[in-house]
Amino acid sequence: MALFKKFAIGIVAHWLHRSKHIMLILTRRIGESIVIGDNIIIRVLDVKGQVKLGIEAPREIEVHREEIYAKIHEEWSEEKD
């Protein structure tokens, strides 16, 4: 039981429900990671005013900052019109 408590305290997680998506909020330290699926790893590299993340993913998976992603989709919808 003590081992479980120690493990549970080490992983702070909250679930937020928004529309049809769920957001998992984790607390991570420098050098720690989270894994998405079988092949995406997000690692905390540095925290100095901003958080620096490293993302390891297969080349066929596109990874963008949110504002770039929105711009790409905006351009795609303009091309369709």
Image (cartoon, helix red, strand yellow):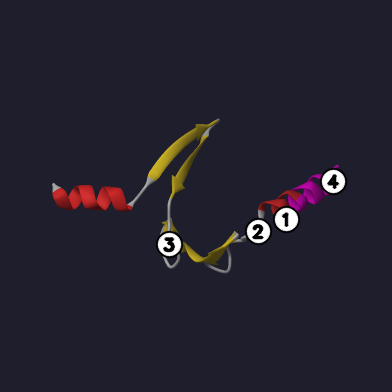
Identify the amino acid type marked 3.
Ser
Q: Which residue position holds label 3?
A: 33
| Mark 1 or 3, closer to the camera | 3
Magenta residues span: 71-81
Alpha carbon of mark 2 to alpha carbon of mark 1: how far? 6 Å
Q: Secondary structure at mark 1?
A: helix
Q: Are marks 1 and 3 in contact (CB under 8 Å)?
A: no
The spot of residue 4 in percent (x, y) is 19, 49
- Number of the label disc, if any, that sits on residue 50: none
- Mark 2 and mark 3 lie on one chain; the one further toward the N terminus is 3
Residue depicted at x 73% and y 55%: 68
Residue depicted at x 45% and y 44%: 24
Q: Secondary structure at mark 3?
A: strand
The spot of residue 22 in percent (x, y) is 48, 38
Q: Are marks 2 and 1 in contact (CB under 8 Å)?
A: yes
Alpha carbon of mark 2 to alpha carbon of mark 4: how far? 20 Å
- Mark 2 and mark 4 lie on one chain; the one further toward the N terminus is 2
Q: Is 76 left, or right, of 50 in this rendering?
A: right
The spot of residue 5 in percent (x, y) is 21, 47
Residue depicted at x 42% and y 62%: 33
- Number of the label disc, if any, that sits on residue 78: 4
| Mark 1 or 4, closer to the camera | 1
- Mark 3 and mark 4 lie on one chain; the one further toward the N terminus is 3
Q: Secondary structure at mark 2?
A: loop
Q: Which residue position holds label 2?
A: 64
- Number of the label disc, if any, that sits on residue 68: 1
